[in-house]
C-alpha cells in the first residue's frame, strides 16, 4: 500500500540556502538508492519548521529507507543542515 512519510525538522541558522541548493542532488540520490521513492516534496510550515513529505511504494520500503538513508552520501550530507528533528511518521494512503 502506498505510504506517505513525513519528517518534521528545523534548520541550522543560516543553512536554509544550502538546504535548498542541495535538495535536487539529495532527491536524485534518494531515487537512485531507493527506487520505491515515488516523489518528494519539501514544505515549510507556518511556524518556520520544515516538513519533508515523501511518497513511497510501500510502508516496508519507506521504513527500510529510513533505516538505511545514511548509505546514500548525498542524503547523509544534506542532513547536516538539520538542527532538530521533530520526528518521522508514516501513514498509508487509503484512497487516492
Image (cartoon, rainbow, N blue to C red):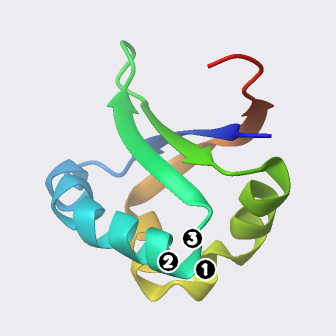
Label 3's element?
loop
What residue is shown with label 3? 35
Label 2's element?
helix
User: Which residue reaches farthest right?
Assistant: 60
x%, y% of residue 11?
38, 47
x%, y% of residue 21?
15, 61
Question: Quick check: marks 1 and 2 in contact, CB under 8 Å?
Answer: yes
Left/right of residue 53 with respect to residue 48 in the rendered view: right
Left/right of residue 89 with respect to residue 71 in the rendered view: right
What residue is shown with label 1? 70
x%, y% of residue 5?
65, 41
Question: Residue visible at 39% across and 16% down?
Answer: 47
> Relative to the observer, which residue lies in front, 36 or 91?
36
Question: Residue visible at 81% across and 49% down?
Answer: 59
Q: In this view, does 52 lie above or below 93?
A: below
- What separation in Å lies between label 3 and label 1 (alpha carbons)? 16 Å
Which callout, 1 or 2, points at the residue further toward the start of the chain? 1
Tell me, for residue 76, which label it has, or none: 2
x%, y% of residue 34?
59, 73
Q: Classify residue 1 by image quadrant.
A: top right
- What separation in Å lies between label 1 and label 2 (alpha carbons)? 5 Å
Label 1's element?
helix
Give the class, few, some or many, for how many residues have Cα within 10 Å of label 2's Cα (few <14, many ≥20): few
Amino acid at each position: 500500500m502506498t505510504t506517505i512519510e513525513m519528517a518534521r525538522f528545523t534548520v541550522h541558522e543560516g543553512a536554509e540556502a544550502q538546504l535548498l541548493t542541495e535538495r535536487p542532488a539529495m532527491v536524485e540520490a534518494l531515487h537512485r538508492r531507493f527506487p520505491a521513492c515515488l516523489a518528494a516534496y519539501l514544505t515549510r510550515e507556518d511556524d518556520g519548521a520544515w516538513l519533508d513529505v515523501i511518497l513511497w511504494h510501500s510502508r516496508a520500503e519507506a521504513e527500510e529507507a529510513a533505516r538505511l538513508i545514511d548509505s546514500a552520501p548525498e542524503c547523509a550530507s544534506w542532513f547536516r543542515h538539520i538542527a532538530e528533528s521533530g520526528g518521522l511518521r508514516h501513514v498509508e494512503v487509503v484512497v487516492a
